[in-house]
Image (tube, rainbow, N blue to C red):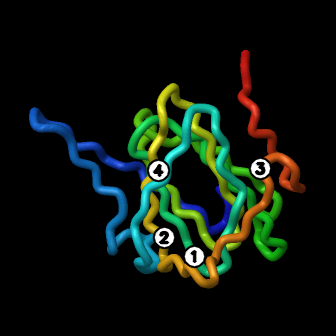
Amino acid sequence: MIEGVMMKKLKVIPDERGRLMEILRADDEMFKGFGQVYMTTAYPGVVKGWHYHKKQHDNMAVVRGMMKIVLYDGRKHSTTFGQINEIFAGEHNPVLIHIPAYVYHGFKCISSEEAIVVNTPSELYDYQEPDEFRVHPHDNDIPYDWHGKDG
């Protein structure tokens, strides 16, 4: 696992009324503060990435569908510099993924329906000076190919 990245297996509690799943708690090791909560989606086959933050830590959980979430450690000082993590998250693998600042990340919807991600970042989004730095999903120096693996 990339240095600073943490994963928490999420527990789904079903009953005859529906289900409940805690995602992030203030007493979790990965909790670094609260900025806001938002959801984002991707349609089947769509890649959203790459980007990183300089201050913000992300805490992402896929609550509908399935996503391939990919992380790249571009931090030259890191013990895991150059490492890629590929995490399959969603209904079939409910996990919370903690992504530290300066770790590139993106995701691809791999389910047949729109996938929904809930993110609880450590910082409030600053509309005037966003802490978001984007890199083209395919034309970049990151050694990763978003295309599916068949066979």
Earlier sequence position, callout 1 versus callout 3: 1
**Left or right of 19, for residue 129:** right
* Residue 28 in picture, x, y percent from top left: 38, 69
Residue at x-position 60% and y-position 84% = 128
Q: Which residue is mark 2?
A: 121
Secondary element under disc 3, as helix, strand or loop, is: loop
Callout 4 secondary element: strand
Which residue has dot 3 on it? 137
Q: Distance between the Cα atoms at labels 4 and 1? A: 17 Å
Residue 39 image point, x, y percent: 43, 56
Residue that numbered label 4 is attached to? 117
Q: Which residue is mark 1?
A: 56
Q: Compute the Cα span from label 2 to label 1.
A: 6 Å
Q: Is residue 18 left or right of residue 143?
A: left
Q: CA distance from mark 4 to mark 3?
A: 18 Å
Q: Rounded to the nearest whole Å, what is the CA distance between mark 2 and mark 3?
A: 22 Å
Q: Alpha carbon of mark 1 to alpha carbon of mark 3: how far?
A: 20 Å
Decide which of 46, 11 is in the foreground and name it: 46
Asked if labels 1 and 2 touch by Cβ distance under 8 angstroms, the answer is yes
Q: Residue at x 76, y 71 (%)?
A: 78
Q: Amino acid at mark 1?
A: Gln
- Whether residue 38 sits left or right of residue 18 in the image: it is right
Nearer to us: label 1 or label 3: 3
